[in-house]
Image: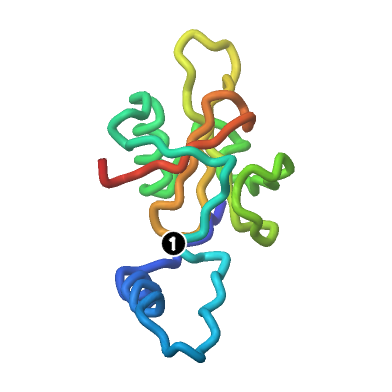
Amino acid sequence: MRIPPRIATGIALAAALLAGGPVAANAAPAPVTPHSATATVAAVGDICYSALPPEAHDTLDLIEAGGPYPYPQDGTVFQNREGLLPPQDSGYYHEFTVETPGSDDRGARRIVTGEATEEDYYTADHYESFDLVDHGC
């Protein structure tokens, strides 16, 4: 299964940060693009990487390695039907199972990835809520 590469690089991030600098008084403000690091959705919270359960760390490691994944649904397109994540074109988000100890099935926990570097969302309640993973803490 082919998973879209994370497309943002350090250079792209630096360019985005520079674009947010001062502008002339009569210049129009720069539009916010779907991949902007500053775009947020009120329905999405934050969670520190260090606060994730160990099984979420295992899933993120598998994603970085490109698999293999324990479930056939892992890596499939996440449709964002709930509308909680920032709106994107179909195929932008992919979902991955986070093992739930003691569960007889996949459980409710997932990582949903976007195409941007470190754009990982954690849900412990099967898409009822999402937290953007802060990889810096």
| Colouring scheme, one of rainbow, by chain, secondary structure, one colour | rainbow
| Residue found 45% across the figure and 40% down from its top | 68
Q: Nearer the viewer, residue 99 or 41?
A: 41
| Residue found 52% across the figure and 53% down from its top | 40
* The C terminus - image quarter: top left
The answer to whether residue 69 shows anywhere in this view is no
Q: Is residue 48 left or right of residue 128?
A: left
Q: Nearer the viewer, residue 45 or 109?
A: 45
Q: Position of residue 37 (x, y in %)?
A: 44, 61
Q: Amino acid at mark 1?
A: Ala
The residue carrying mark 1 is 37
Q: Position of residue 5 (x, y in %)?
A: 47, 61
Q: Position of residue 45 (x, y in %)?
A: 48, 38
Q: Is residue 34 left or right of residue 131?
A: right
* Disc 1, SS: loop
Q: Which residue is outermost to the right? A: 81
Name above or below for residue 85 compared with residue 106: below
